[in-house]
Image (cartoon, rainbow, N blue to C red):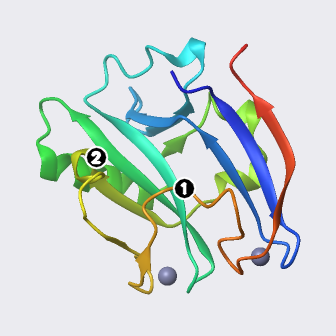
């Protein structure tokens, strides 16, 4: 099991800030919202009755200078099929029907303001499938933002804050 943690980075050159957190998951909750959560012990069973669930990956478009959230659906149960599941998560994301009850205590309020989404099925994640920015259509990296250099300017980065959530 990957350890749950949140690390904040900042570029020493341009000041760009971002976080690397996870494992991040989502499921359709009983209120008909996307429940976003980080996988800590108390959240292990959260998706067990959900009909749609999967992983969240955060990435970035250099061209738009915009953070992009990817909802990668890995589990779909009746009454939904694949197409319906994608359409539903897209709809809820666009309508901002998102709940962060478990994640909220650990993150800064500004981190909740992602407003650019991609929804896909996770079985495509490790294929050669390419992802494109929903705004400008340029190719974006599949994985989370770099830990080695600034995704915006390539400059040196430093860790500005971080916490390990495993003991919670
Ligand atoms: Zn873009
Ligand atoms: Zn930079």
Image-quadrant location for residue 61? bottom right
Relative to residue 74, is residue 87 depicted above or below? below
Number of residues whose C-alpha sits closer than 10 Å to that of mark 1, classed few (under 14), some (14–19) or many (20 or more): some
Q: Residue at x 30, y 70 (%)?
A: 130
Query: For the residue labelled by badge 1, is the local secondary structure a helix, a strand or a loop?
Result: loop
| Quadrant that contains the C terminus | top right
Whether the residue carrying mark 1 lies under 8 Å from ligand 2 is answered with no
From the image, tell me which residue sits under label 2: 122
Residue 152 image position (x, y, % from top left): 68, 77
In the image shown, does 107 or 154 lie closer to the viewer? 154
Image location (x, y in percent) of residue 154: 71, 77
Kindly identify the residue that appears in the image at 71 percent across and 39 percent down: 6
Return the residue nearer the eye: 57 or 117. 57
Q: Is residue 8 above or below residue 49?
A: below
Cβ–Cβ under 8 Å for marks 2 and 1: no
Task: Answer with mark 2 or mark 1, whichever residue precedes in sequence.
Answer: 2
Separation (CA) of disc 2 from disc 1: 15 Å
In the picture, measured across the screen, residue 85 lies left or right of residue 58, that is left
Identified at 73% across, 13% down, the residue is 167
Residue of label 1:
144
**Which label is found at residue 167?**
none
Q: Secondary structure at mark 2?
A: helix
Instruction: Measuring from the top left, give residue 144's x and y in whole percent.
Output: 54, 55
């Amino acid at each position: 099991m990957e350890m749950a943690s949140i690390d904040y980075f900042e570029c020493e050159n341009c000041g760009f800030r971002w976080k690397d957190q996870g494992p991040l998951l989502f499921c359709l909750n009983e209120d008909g919202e996307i429940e976003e959560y980080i996988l800590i012990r108390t959240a292990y069973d959260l998706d067990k009755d959900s009909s749609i669930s999967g992983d969240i990956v955060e990435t970035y478009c250099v061209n738009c200078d915009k953070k992009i959230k990817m909802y990668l659906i890995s589990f779909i149960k009746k009454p939904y099929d694949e197409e319906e599941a994608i359409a539903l998560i897209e709809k809820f994301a666009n309508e901002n029907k998102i709940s962060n009850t478990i994640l909220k205590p650990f993150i800064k309020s500004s981190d909740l303001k992602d407003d650019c989404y991609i929804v896909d099925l996770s079985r495509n994640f490790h294929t050669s499938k390419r992802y494109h920015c929903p705004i400008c259509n340029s190719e974006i990296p599949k994985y989370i933002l770099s830990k080695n250099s600034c995704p915006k300017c390539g400059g040196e980065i430093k860790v500005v804050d971080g916490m390990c959530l495993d003991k919670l």
